[in-house]
Image (cartoon, rainbow, N blue to C red):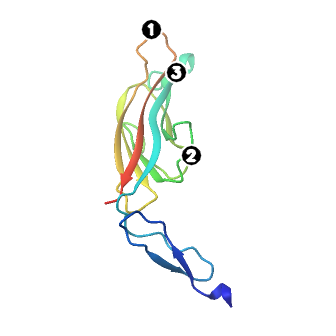
Amino acid sequence: DARDAAMEIKQEHLPGEAVHQQQATNGQEPPPAKRRKKQTAICCPLVYGSIAFWLGKKADEFHTHEWTLYVRGPRGEDLSYCLEKVVFKLHPSFPQPVREVTRSPFEVTEKGWGEFEAAIRLHFKDPSERPVELAHVVKLYDGSSGAGAAGAGGASGAGFAGS
């Protein structure tokens, strides 16, 4: 039967690089390459940051603000296509200060009263890529005289290149 026959798959290649051939059987896709391609880079644009809101009269002395620490695409896009998980390491005073988020949205929301530096570790879908560590200060106040929302963030083109 033709469906059971092996199918030859040719991958695109760069100048000077040999064409690799893989076999797929029963109409299945070939497994992804287990090694990096030379002169190849993959880019996963992302932003990370936090936003905080003063709770006003609903606040108590230990919960003055609600804040969210996040990793997302530049326009709020879902990054599940490139991220396996994101691990947020919060201040040790929080219950379960290490939070692992394995699906979108990659964010953590809490209530608190103080600012602190959080660690964010990005784990990529490609197991050959090493995790990337980021640091971000969760700010509750924006520095202005008004009590409103504070937000801060960073942008990254989490890129990784073939070796």
Question: How packed is label 1: few (under 14 Cα within 10 Å), some, or many (20 or more)?
Answer: few
Q: Nearer the viewer, residue 80 or 156?
A: 156
Residue placed under numbered mark 2 in the picture: 78
Could you tell which of marks 3 and 2 lies nearer the N-terminus?
3
Amino acid type, label 2: Asp
Task: Report the residue marked by disc 1.
Answer: 145
Secondary element type, mark 1? loop
Badge 3 marks a residue whose secondary structure is loop
In front: label 2 or label 1: 2
Where is 157 relative to 140, above or below? below
Residue 102 pos. (x, y %) = 50, 53
The answer to which of marks 2 and 1 sits earlier in the sequence is 2
Tell me whether the residue at label 3 lies in contact with that at label 2, contact meaning CB atoms closer than 8 angstroms. Answer: no
Image quarter where the C terminus lies is bottom left
Of mark 3 and mark 1, the one earlier in the sequence is 3
Question: For the residues marked 3 and 2, what is the alpha-carbon distance in whole angstroms?
Answer: 32 Å
Q: Which residue is mark 3?
A: 59
Q: Amino acid at mark 1?
A: Ser
- On the image, the x and y values in percent for residue 34 come to 40, 70
Q: Nearer the viewer, mark 3 or mark 2?
A: 2
Please state which of residues 74 and 49 is positioned toward the viewer in this rendering: 74
